[in-house]
Amino acid sequence: MSSTILSPALASHLAAAPLDHVTQEYPNKLDHVMGGAGDVQSPRDLHPIFFGSFDWHSCVHGWWTLLTLYRLFPNMPEALAIRDLADRMLTQAGVAGELAYLNRPESAGFERPYGWGWLLMLAAELHRHDSDEGRRWSATLHPLADAFAERFKRFLPKSPYPVRVGTHMNTGLALRFALEYADLVGDTDLATLCRSKALSWHSQDIGAQVWEPSQDEFLSPTLQVGELMRRVLPADQFARWFDAYLPDGLPTVLLQPPLVTDRSDGKIAHLDGLSLSRAWCLRSLATSLSQDDPRRIQALAAAERHVSAALPHIAEDYMGQHWLASFVLLAVAAHREDV
């Protein structure tokens, strides 16, 4: 099984886990603010679609993984099971239930910003589908995508500072995902706001301090900013920005996979995700570097090392299994324009 090519065999491997866990209710870690005793409910009661995969955001991007693979490999052995499950789960009633939860006063900060970004990535994926069922799923999810797009539009203007930590609060990843959605569906207001905020936060980032990894990070604070700005800036402007951002080239610490000592520990298992998200960013950034740029060669070689370090372990324990397939897909499809 190749760690660099999204082959049919790898697609089947990546689909296996989310096919099971997007409807596995327990164990479950809720992001749930209760306003009273009546709010003590089960994950399935609170979230009629996204109740599985240990937590809400992992369920969302588990669906992103399944539906991306369904589009790219329509004849894969798992395609029928994916379609049947999506028909059963992605319903108007389910979306209404998710919206009802989102509209609670206590849910104002629900899944901000990580889950927001992933929900828009799921909506962006469905927007790419040209099958009858894909268009139906996209239309069904549209009201929920609109709700999260509006949350970004309200939140970003009152956010003077980025969040650079390599965990769920990272604004670089969320903005990168929101911008992909906005560009794809033609939400010019959101796209303009995302670009403006990215420039406000990061256009003057010079000589980045690369203090990573931290123990429970699954994102590279340094590379996520780079990947966001690659999406925001025209190629010539990005080249100048990137030279100033990392003036001494790619730091050695970003080129070697982190050590993962206990994959049954949910926080330590984040480090497999760090390997995969680094690989995604490194491969994406390499597309903006010239063929003879030594940083490009370094980035691609490092990405290979990172994927090879994490891929064999993605199903080793549920603490990684419930989410890592999505980050493998990001990493191995980074060079593709259709993902």
Image (spheres, rainbow, N blue to C red):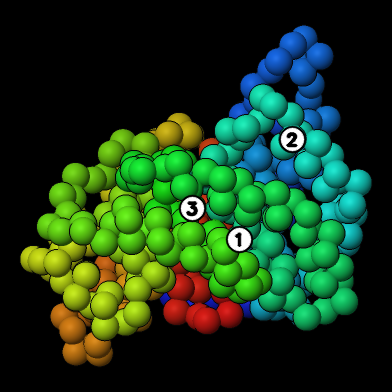
> Of the residues under marks 3 and 1, which one precedes in the sequence?
1
The residue most toward the left is 248
Question: Is 134 placed left or right of 281 in the picture?
Answer: right
* Residue 11 visible to the viewer: no
On residue 184, which mark appears?
none
* Camera-side residue of 338 and 73: 338
The earlier-in-sequence mark between 2 and 1 is 2
Q: Are marks 2 and 3 in contact (CB under 8 Å)?
A: no
- Please, what secondary structure does the residue beneath circle 1 have? helix
Q: Nearer the viewer, mark 2 or mark 3?
A: 2
Residue 57 or residue 253, whichever sits in front: 57
Position of the C terminus, as image quadrant, is: bottom right
Question: Badge 2 is on which residue?
Answer: 103
**Residue at the image point whose x is 58% and y is 38% from the top:** 111
Residue 300: x percent and y percent? 30, 75
Mark number displayed over residue 174: 3
Residue 121 is marked as 1
Amino acid type of the residue that numbered disc 2 sits on in the rendered structure: Asn
Q: Is residue 318 left or right of 269 when viewed as pictured?
A: right
Give x and y (percent) for residue 8. 63, 77
- Sort mark 2 into few (<14), some (14-19) or many (20+) by Cα contacts within 10 Å: few
The CA distance from mark 3 to mark 1 is 10 Å
**Position of residue 71 measured from the top left corner of the image (x, y, whole percent):** 71, 75
Foreground mark, 2 or 1, reads: 2
State the separation of the CA atoms marked 2 and 3. 21 Å
- What percent of the width, then of the height, locates residue 108? 62, 32
